Amino acid sequence: MRFKVLVVLFALALAVTACAQPAATPAPTTAPEPTAAPAATTAPEPTMAPEPTAAPAATTAPEPTSAPTEAPAASGGTLPEVNPLDVTGDIITAGSSTVFPLSEAVAEKFREEGYAGNITIDSIGTGAGFERFCKTGETDVANASRAIKDSEVENCAAIGRTPVEFRVGTDALAVVVNPENDWLSEGVTLEELAKLFSKDSTNWSDVNAAWPNEPIKRFSPGTDSGTFDYFIEAVMDPAFDKKGEEALLGAANLQLSEDDNVLVQGVAGDKYAIGYFGFAYFLENEDKLLDIAVEGVQPTEETVNAGEYKLARPLFIYSDAKVMQDKPQVASFINFYLTSVNDVIGGVGYFPAPADALDAAAQAFLDATK
Protein backbone atom coordinates (compact mmCIF):
# COMPACT_ATOMS: atom_id res chain seq x y z
CA MET A 1 0.00 0.00 0.00
CA ARG A 2 2.79 2.30 0.89
CA PHE A 3 4.53 1.38 -2.36
CA LYS A 4 1.43 2.27 -4.40
CA VAL A 5 1.27 5.63 -2.81
CA LEU A 6 4.89 6.36 -3.76
CA VAL A 7 4.29 5.32 -7.35
CA VAL A 8 1.31 7.63 -7.57
CA LEU A 9 3.29 10.51 -6.10
CA PHE A 10 6.14 9.90 -8.53
CA ALA A 11 3.71 9.89 -11.46
CA LEU A 12 2.17 13.13 -10.31
CA ALA A 13 5.59 14.74 -10.08
CA LEU A 14 6.41 13.78 -13.63
CA ALA A 15 3.09 15.18 -14.80
CA VAL A 16 3.77 18.42 -13.04
CA THR A 17 7.24 18.82 -14.60
CA ALA A 18 5.87 17.88 -18.02
CA CYS A 19 3.18 20.53 -17.74
CA ALA A 20 5.61 23.16 -16.53
CA GLN A 21 8.04 22.72 -19.47
CA PRO A 22 5.76 23.75 -22.35
CA ALA A 23 5.05 27.07 -20.57
CA ALA A 24 8.76 28.00 -20.60
CA THR A 25 9.50 27.11 -24.23
CA PRO A 26 7.04 29.49 -25.89
CA ALA A 27 9.05 32.55 -24.79
CA PRO A 28 12.13 31.71 -26.87
CA THR A 29 10.07 30.80 -29.91
CA THR A 30 8.14 34.06 -29.91
CA ALA A 31 11.36 35.99 -29.42
CA PRO A 32 11.99 35.87 -33.14
CA GLU A 33 9.30 38.58 -33.34
CA PRO A 34 12.07 41.09 -32.85
CA THR A 35 13.24 39.88 -36.21
CA ALA A 36 10.08 41.52 -37.42
CA ALA A 37 12.00 44.66 -36.63
CA PRO A 38 13.48 44.36 -40.08
CA ALA A 39 10.02 45.35 -41.11
CA ALA A 40 11.03 48.50 -39.34
CA THR A 41 13.25 48.90 -42.34
CA THR A 42 10.04 50.25 -43.76
CA ALA A 43 10.87 52.97 -41.29
CA PRO A 44 12.60 54.53 -44.20
CA GLU A 45 9.48 56.64 -43.90
CA PRO A 46 11.95 59.06 -42.38
CA THR A 47 13.41 58.93 -45.81
CA MET A 48 10.24 60.82 -46.67
CA ALA A 49 12.17 63.64 -45.14
CA PRO A 50 13.57 64.04 -48.62
CA GLU A 51 10.50 66.23 -48.91
CA PRO A 52 12.94 68.95 -47.93
CA THR A 53 14.34 68.18 -51.32
CA ALA A 54 11.26 70.05 -52.43
CA ALA A 55 13.27 72.99 -51.13
CA PRO A 56 14.86 73.10 -54.53
CA ALA A 57 11.53 74.53 -55.51
CA ALA A 58 12.58 77.33 -53.24
CA THR A 59 15.25 77.93 -55.83
CA THR A 60 12.41 79.72 -57.57
CA ALA A 61 13.28 82.36 -55.00
CA PRO A 62 15.73 83.64 -57.59
CA GLU A 63 12.86 86.00 -58.32
CA PRO A 64 14.98 88.57 -56.49
CA THR A 65 17.55 88.05 -59.22
CA SER A 66 15.13 89.74 -61.61
CA ALA A 67 15.73 93.02 -59.78
CA PRO A 68 19.48 93.06 -60.35
CA THR A 69 18.87 92.65 -64.06
CA GLU A 70 17.43 96.16 -64.02
CA ALA A 71 20.84 97.65 -63.27
CA PRO A 72 22.67 96.08 -66.20
CA ALA A 73 19.81 97.17 -68.44
CA ALA A 74 20.17 100.71 -67.13
CA SER A 75 23.90 100.67 -67.70
CA GLY A 76 23.10 99.82 -71.30
CA GLY A 77 21.03 102.96 -71.70
CA THR A 78 17.60 102.19 -70.18
CA LEU A 79 16.31 105.23 -68.33
CA PRO A 80 14.06 105.21 -65.25
CA GLU A 81 10.44 106.16 -65.75
CA VAL A 82 9.39 109.76 -65.13
CA ASN A 83 5.94 110.73 -63.88
CA PRO A 84 5.44 114.37 -64.90
CA LEU A 85 2.79 114.71 -62.16
CA ASP A 86 5.57 114.34 -59.59
CA VAL A 87 7.86 116.97 -61.13
CA THR A 88 7.94 120.45 -59.58
CA GLY A 89 10.08 123.51 -60.28
CA ASP A 90 10.74 125.62 -63.38
CA ILE A 91 13.00 124.82 -66.34
CA ILE A 92 14.82 127.32 -68.56
CA THR A 93 16.15 126.46 -72.03
CA ALA A 94 17.42 128.55 -74.94
CA GLY A 95 19.28 128.17 -78.21
CA SER A 96 18.81 126.79 -81.69
CA SER A 97 15.80 127.90 -83.70
CA THR A 98 15.98 124.52 -85.42
CA VAL A 99 15.75 122.54 -82.18
CA PHE A 100 13.11 124.97 -80.85
CA PRO A 101 10.04 123.22 -82.40
CA LEU A 102 11.30 119.84 -81.21
CA SER A 103 11.80 121.05 -77.65
CA GLU A 104 8.40 122.73 -77.81
CA ALA A 105 6.77 119.45 -78.83
CA VAL A 106 8.47 117.52 -76.03
CA ALA A 107 7.56 120.22 -73.49
CA GLU A 108 3.93 120.13 -74.61
CA LYS A 109 3.85 116.35 -74.11
CA PHE A 110 5.45 116.83 -70.68
CA ARG A 111 2.66 119.26 -69.72
CA GLU A 112 -0.06 117.03 -71.15
CA GLU A 113 1.13 114.19 -68.92
CA GLY A 114 0.93 116.28 -65.78
CA TYR A 115 3.87 118.69 -65.37
CA ALA A 116 2.48 121.92 -63.90
CA GLY A 117 5.65 124.06 -63.75
CA ASN A 118 6.98 126.55 -66.28
CA ILE A 119 9.26 125.64 -69.18
CA THR A 120 10.89 128.58 -70.94
CA ILE A 121 12.20 127.82 -74.45
CA ASP A 122 13.86 130.79 -76.18
CA SER A 123 14.69 130.57 -79.89
CA ILE A 124 17.83 132.71 -80.13
CA GLY A 125 20.27 130.61 -82.16
CA THR A 126 22.77 127.98 -81.11
CA GLY A 127 25.64 130.39 -80.44
CA ALA A 128 23.51 132.70 -78.33
CA GLY A 129 22.12 129.70 -76.50
CA PHE A 130 25.63 128.57 -75.55
CA GLU A 131 26.39 132.10 -74.34
CA ARG A 132 23.48 131.98 -71.93
CA PHE A 133 24.38 128.48 -70.82
CA CYS A 134 28.18 128.78 -70.66
CA LYS A 135 28.89 132.46 -70.03
CA THR A 136 26.11 133.78 -67.84
CA GLY A 137 24.74 130.47 -66.56
CA GLU A 138 21.18 131.72 -67.01
CA THR A 139 19.77 128.55 -68.53
CA ASP A 140 19.47 124.90 -67.51
CA VAL A 141 19.52 123.46 -71.03
CA ALA A 142 21.09 124.65 -74.31
CA ASN A 143 19.44 123.65 -77.59
CA ALA A 144 21.93 123.22 -80.43
CA SER A 145 21.91 122.33 -84.11
CA ARG A 146 25.66 121.73 -84.02
CA ALA A 147 28.16 120.29 -81.57
CA ILE A 148 29.54 122.63 -78.92
CA LYS A 149 32.81 124.39 -79.78
CA ASP A 150 36.00 124.15 -77.72
CA SER A 151 35.78 127.86 -76.92
CA GLU A 152 32.25 127.36 -75.57
CA VAL A 153 33.39 124.42 -73.44
CA GLU A 154 36.08 126.72 -71.99
CA ASN A 155 33.45 129.36 -71.22
CA CYS A 156 31.42 126.72 -69.39
CA ALA A 157 34.45 125.63 -67.38
CA ALA A 158 35.04 129.23 -66.31
CA ILE A 159 31.69 129.23 -64.47
CA GLY A 160 32.06 125.68 -63.15
CA ARG A 161 29.97 123.87 -65.73
CA THR A 162 30.87 120.80 -67.77
CA PRO A 163 28.47 120.46 -70.71
CA VAL A 164 26.90 117.04 -71.20
CA GLU A 165 25.79 116.34 -74.77
CA PHE A 166 22.54 114.54 -75.67
CA ARG A 167 21.81 113.70 -79.32
CA VAL A 168 18.04 114.02 -79.82
CA GLY A 169 17.43 113.86 -83.57
CA THR A 170 18.51 114.53 -87.12
CA ASP A 171 17.62 117.48 -89.32
CA ALA A 172 17.80 117.73 -93.08
CA LEU A 173 18.60 121.27 -94.13
CA ALA A 174 15.98 122.40 -96.64
CA VAL A 175 17.04 124.59 -99.57
CA VAL A 176 13.93 126.48 -100.64
CA VAL A 177 12.79 128.76 -103.45
CA ASN A 178 9.67 130.61 -104.45
CA PRO A 179 6.91 128.45 -106.05
CA GLU A 180 7.26 130.50 -109.27
CA ASN A 181 10.85 129.37 -109.69
CA ASP A 182 10.82 127.12 -112.77
CA TRP A 183 14.55 126.93 -113.50
CA LEU A 184 15.62 124.80 -110.54
CA SER A 185 13.30 121.88 -111.17
CA GLU A 186 16.33 119.59 -111.28
CA GLY A 187 17.80 121.09 -108.11
CA VAL A 188 21.35 122.31 -107.57
CA THR A 189 24.80 120.90 -106.96
CA LEU A 190 26.71 121.79 -103.79
CA GLU A 191 29.06 123.90 -105.90
CA GLU A 192 26.17 125.84 -107.46
CA LEU A 193 24.59 126.33 -104.05
CA ALA A 194 27.82 127.80 -102.68
CA LYS A 195 28.05 130.22 -105.61
CA LEU A 196 24.40 131.26 -105.19
CA PHE A 197 25.21 132.41 -101.65
CA SER A 198 28.56 134.02 -102.38
CA LYS A 199 29.80 137.51 -103.11
CA ASP A 200 31.12 136.19 -106.44
CA SER A 201 27.59 136.03 -107.90
CA THR A 202 25.06 138.81 -108.18
CA ASN A 203 22.57 137.44 -110.71
CA TRP A 204 21.26 133.92 -111.19
CA SER A 205 22.90 133.86 -114.61
CA ASP A 206 26.30 134.38 -112.99
CA VAL A 207 26.05 130.83 -111.68
CA ASN A 208 24.40 129.23 -114.73
CA ALA A 209 23.92 131.08 -118.02
CA ALA A 210 20.60 129.28 -118.54
CA TRP A 211 19.17 130.86 -115.41
CA PRO A 212 17.50 134.32 -115.29
CA ASN A 213 19.60 137.43 -115.52
CA GLU A 214 17.98 138.67 -112.33
CA PRO A 215 19.45 139.48 -108.89
CA ILE A 216 19.63 136.60 -106.44
CA LYS A 217 17.67 137.45 -103.27
CA ARG A 218 19.36 135.46 -100.50
CA PHE A 219 17.82 134.55 -97.15
CA SER A 220 20.00 132.97 -94.48
CA PRO A 221 19.85 132.30 -90.75
CA GLY A 222 21.93 134.74 -88.71
CA THR A 223 25.51 134.23 -87.58
CA ASP A 224 24.39 133.10 -84.10
CA SER A 225 22.49 130.23 -85.66
CA GLY A 226 23.79 126.68 -85.67
CA THR A 227 22.12 126.36 -89.07
CA PHE A 228 24.36 129.16 -90.37
CA ASP A 229 27.44 127.45 -88.93
CA TYR A 230 26.46 124.15 -90.50
CA PHE A 231 25.82 125.73 -93.92
CA ILE A 232 29.24 127.39 -93.81
CA GLU A 233 30.92 124.12 -92.88
CA ALA A 234 29.03 121.84 -95.29
CA VAL A 235 28.53 124.12 -98.30
CA MET A 236 30.62 127.29 -98.27
CA ASP A 237 34.00 126.28 -96.81
CA PRO A 238 34.65 123.42 -99.27
CA ALA A 239 33.99 125.79 -102.19
CA PHE A 240 35.93 128.77 -100.84
CA ASP A 241 38.99 127.20 -99.22
CA LYS A 242 37.76 127.56 -95.63
CA LYS A 243 36.71 131.17 -96.22
CA GLY A 244 33.07 130.38 -96.72
CA GLU A 245 31.74 132.74 -94.05
CA GLU A 246 33.54 135.69 -95.65
CA ALA A 247 32.16 134.72 -99.08
CA LEU A 248 28.60 134.51 -97.78
CA LEU A 249 28.58 137.61 -95.61
CA GLY A 250 29.96 139.67 -98.51
CA ALA A 251 27.12 138.67 -100.86
CA ALA A 252 24.69 141.28 -102.19
CA ASN A 253 20.98 141.15 -101.45
CA LEU A 254 21.52 139.10 -98.30
CA GLN A 255 18.94 138.99 -95.52
CA LEU A 256 20.09 137.42 -92.23
CA SER A 257 17.67 136.54 -89.44
CA GLU A 258 17.59 134.32 -86.37
CA ASP A 259 13.85 134.00 -86.94
CA ASP A 260 13.17 131.32 -89.53
CA ASN A 261 9.69 132.71 -90.09
CA VAL A 262 11.26 135.90 -91.44
CA LEU A 263 13.22 133.77 -93.91
CA VAL A 264 10.06 131.90 -94.95
CA GLN A 265 8.24 135.15 -95.63
CA GLY A 266 11.18 136.54 -97.59
CA VAL A 267 11.45 133.57 -99.94
CA ALA A 268 7.67 133.26 -100.30
CA GLY A 269 7.46 136.91 -101.30
CA ASP A 270 10.02 137.03 -104.15
CA LYS A 271 10.27 134.92 -107.30
CA TYR A 272 14.06 135.31 -107.39
CA ALA A 273 14.66 134.39 -103.78
CA ILE A 274 16.47 131.39 -102.32
CA GLY A 275 16.94 130.42 -98.69
CA TYR A 276 17.79 127.57 -96.33
CA PHE A 277 16.71 126.45 -92.85
CA GLY A 278 15.62 123.38 -90.90
CA PHE A 279 13.36 120.93 -92.71
CA ALA A 280 10.61 121.36 -90.10
CA TYR A 281 10.07 124.97 -91.17
CA PHE A 282 9.72 123.92 -94.77
CA LEU A 283 7.06 121.35 -93.84
CA GLU A 284 5.15 124.02 -91.92
CA ASN A 285 5.20 126.24 -95.00
CA GLU A 286 5.25 123.85 -97.96
CA ASP A 287 2.18 125.56 -99.38
CA LYS A 288 4.30 128.72 -99.80
CA LEU A 289 7.67 127.26 -100.81
CA LEU A 290 9.41 124.67 -102.96
CA ASP A 291 12.24 122.56 -101.58
CA ILE A 292 14.85 121.61 -104.17
CA ALA A 293 17.06 118.58 -104.57
CA VAL A 294 20.77 118.83 -103.72
CA GLU A 295 23.07 116.69 -105.86
CA GLY A 296 19.91 115.13 -107.31
CA VAL A 297 18.54 113.94 -103.94
CA GLN A 298 15.45 115.22 -102.11
CA PRO A 299 15.49 115.18 -98.30
CA THR A 300 13.36 112.30 -96.99
CA GLU A 301 13.67 109.96 -94.02
CA GLU A 302 15.05 107.27 -96.35
CA THR A 303 17.66 109.48 -98.02
CA VAL A 304 18.70 111.04 -94.72
CA ASN A 305 19.12 107.71 -92.92
CA ALA A 306 20.96 106.25 -95.90
CA GLY A 307 23.38 109.17 -95.92
CA GLU A 308 22.35 110.05 -99.48
CA TYR A 309 21.12 113.56 -98.77
CA LYS A 310 24.21 115.70 -98.29
CA LEU A 311 22.75 118.32 -95.96
CA ALA A 312 21.66 116.23 -92.97
CA ARG A 313 22.94 117.09 -89.49
CA PRO A 314 22.56 116.03 -85.86
CA LEU A 315 20.47 117.93 -83.30
CA PHE A 316 21.44 118.21 -79.62
CA ILE A 317 20.52 119.47 -76.21
CA TYR A 318 23.15 120.15 -73.53
CA SER A 319 23.06 120.39 -69.76
CA ASP A 320 25.42 119.96 -66.81
CA ALA A 321 25.60 117.24 -64.13
CA LYS A 322 25.48 119.69 -61.23
CA VAL A 323 22.52 121.53 -62.75
CA MET A 324 20.65 118.22 -63.06
CA GLN A 325 21.55 117.21 -59.50
CA ASP A 326 20.66 120.59 -57.99
CA LYS A 327 17.45 120.86 -60.03
CA PRO A 328 15.75 117.46 -60.21
CA GLN A 329 13.09 118.93 -62.49
CA VAL A 330 15.75 119.54 -65.15
CA ALA A 331 16.97 115.95 -64.88
CA SER A 332 13.38 114.71 -65.13
CA PHE A 333 12.72 116.83 -68.21
CA ILE A 334 15.87 115.61 -69.98
CA ASN A 335 15.03 112.02 -69.05
CA PHE A 336 11.52 112.52 -70.44
CA TYR A 337 12.97 114.22 -73.55
CA LEU A 338 15.21 111.27 -74.36
CA THR A 339 12.47 108.68 -73.83
CA SER A 340 9.71 110.62 -75.62
CA VAL A 341 11.48 112.43 -78.46
CA ASN A 342 10.79 109.74 -81.05
CA ASP A 343 7.06 109.99 -80.27
CA VAL A 344 6.97 113.59 -81.53
CA ILE A 345 9.91 114.08 -83.86
CA GLY A 346 8.13 112.92 -87.02
CA GLY A 347 5.28 115.34 -86.44
CA VAL A 348 7.76 118.18 -86.07
CA GLY A 349 9.41 117.36 -89.39
CA TYR A 350 12.74 115.94 -88.30
CA PHE A 351 14.15 112.43 -88.31
CA PRO A 352 14.99 110.17 -85.34
CA ALA A 353 18.59 109.97 -84.23
CA PRO A 354 20.25 106.59 -84.85
CA ALA A 355 19.49 104.06 -82.10
CA ASP A 356 23.12 103.92 -80.96
CA ALA A 357 23.21 107.72 -80.64
CA LEU A 358 20.10 107.69 -78.45
CA ASP A 359 21.61 104.87 -76.38
CA ALA A 360 24.75 106.95 -75.90
CA ALA A 361 22.63 109.93 -74.83
CA ALA A 362 20.79 107.77 -72.29
CA GLN A 363 24.11 106.50 -70.92
CA ALA A 364 25.43 110.06 -70.67
CA PHE A 365 22.36 110.94 -68.63
CA LEU A 366 22.83 107.96 -66.30
CA ASP A 367 26.50 108.83 -65.81
CA ALA A 368 25.69 112.46 -65.03
CA THR A 369 22.94 111.70 -62.53
CA LYS A 370 24.31 108.65 -60.67
Image (spheres, grey):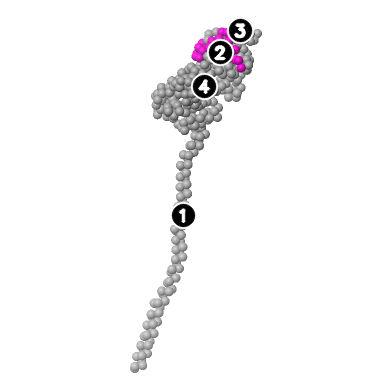
Q: Residue furthest top?
A: 213
Q: Position of residue 332 (x, y in %)?
A: 44, 28
Q: CA distance from mark 3 to mark 2?
A: 15 Å
Q: Which mark is residue 50?
A: 1
Q: Nearer the viewer, residue 231 or 209?
A: 231
Q: Which mark is residue 152?
A: 4
Q: Is 245 in the magenta?
A: yes
Q: Earlier in the sequence, mark 3 or mark 2?
A: 3
Mark 2 sits on what residue?
A: 275
Q: Nearer the viewer, residue 71 or 268?
A: 71
Q: Are marks 1 and 4 in contact (CB under 8 Å)?
A: no
Q: Earlier in the sequence, mark 3 or mark 4?
A: 4
Q: Earlier in the sequence, mark 4 or mark 2?
A: 4
Q: CA distance from mark 2 to mark 1?
A: 83 Å
Amino acid type, residue under disc 3 in the picture:
Asn
Of discs 1 and 4, which sits in the foreground?
4
Tell me the element at label 1. loop
Q: CA distance from mark 4 to mark 2?
A: 28 Å
Q: CA distance from mark 3 to mark 1?
A: 97 Å
Q: Which mark is residue 203?
A: 3
Tell me the element at label 4. helix
Q: Are marks 3 and 1 in contact (CB under 8 Å)?
A: no
**Residue that appears at 60% across and 15% down:** 243
In the rendered image of this protein, does residue 119 appear above or below residue 264? below
Amino acid type, residue under disc 1 in the picture:
Pro
